[in-house]
Image (tube, rainbow, N blue to C red):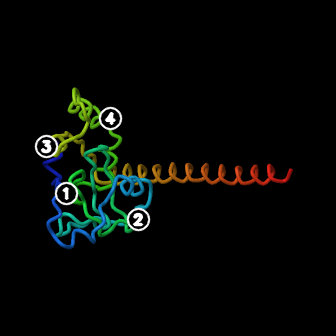
Amino acid sequence: MKLEDIVTVRVGKNLSRGNEKNDETLVAYSYGDLVNDLEGSFLDFQTNLYQEHTDGYLCSTGDVVFSFVSSKAGIVSELNQGKIINQNFAKLILDQEILDPCYLCYALNESYNVKKQMAIAMQGSIVPKLTPAILKGFEIKLPTMQKQQTIGKAYFTLKKYHALVRKQAELEELVLFQILNQLDQQQ
């Protein structure tokens, strides 16, 4: 089934045209925000984690966002609620009764089938960047809702685990260097 049959892709706002006065006060959703959201800031597996919102450009907790530059999808955490989506991102609006948001992120980020389609679509591109039209045309497999939820939850749990392992290694290195620094100064 094509992604456009089950998902509406709403491209973010072109912020370089900032004609509105309140654009200055809004903070843009960034790639770093997407990585943080993908790595576990959003791990509340409630049944109604996603809702469609009226403002197409502002992030709300539970929104599924996709980066055209990195070709990654994530779910907006509470930390990033209220940030504005620029034209390098899109909100993916879906019916949660048909498609689990966590499974959609897994499918777009890790699925062999989608990765193969991305590679073919960007073949020959000087700057590999997906377009909304290419994204909408991706074929996606839809297992049962129960299987989608199992895969989606496992995927986000794994991403959170990897982020925690990296953080632990960074902290261990910091502590070790502090100890070495203290030993070095005791001479």
Contact (Cβ within 8 Å) of mark 4 with mark 1:
no
Mark 1 vs 3, N-terminal side: 1
Mark 4 vs 3, N-terminal side: 4
Marker disc for residue 133 = 3
Q: Where does residue 131 sit, x and y in percent of width and height? A: 18, 43
Q: CA distance from mark 1 to mark 3?
A: 22 Å
Q: Where does residue 71 sit, x and y in percent of width and height? A: 29, 43
User: Which residue is at a point 27% across and 51% down the rendered structure image?
Assistant: 66
Q: Amino acid at mark 1?
A: Ser
Residue 161 lies left or right of residue 13; in this view the side is right
Contact (Cβ within 8 Å) of mark 4 with mark 3:
no
Of tags 2 and 1, the one toward the viewer is: 1
Residue 186 seen in the figure? yes
Q: CA distance from mark 4 to mark 2?
A: 26 Å
Q: Mark 4 Cα within 10 Å, few/some/many (few <14, many 20+)?
A: few
Marker disc for residue 156 = none
Image-quadrant location for residue 85: bottom left
According to the picture, the residue beneath numbered tag 1 turns out to be 16
- Where 85 sits versus 5, above or below? below
Contact (Cβ within 8 Å) of mark 1 with mark 3:
no
Marker disc for residue 112 = 4
Mark 2 vs 3, N-terminal side: 2
Q: Mark 1 Cα within 10 Å, few/some/many (few <14, many 20+)?
A: few
Q: CA distance from mark 4 to mark 1?
A: 35 Å
Mark 4 vs 2, N-terminal side: 2
Of tags 4 and 1, the one toward the viewer is: 1
Q: CA distance from mark 2 to mark 3?
A: 31 Å
According to the picture, the residue beneath numbered tag 2 turns out to be 44
Residue 48 seen in the figure? no
Q: Where does residue 135 sit, x and y in percent of width and height? A: 19, 43
Q: CA distance from mark 2 to mark 1?
A: 34 Å
Q: Where does residue 12 sit, x and y in percent of width and height? A: 20, 57
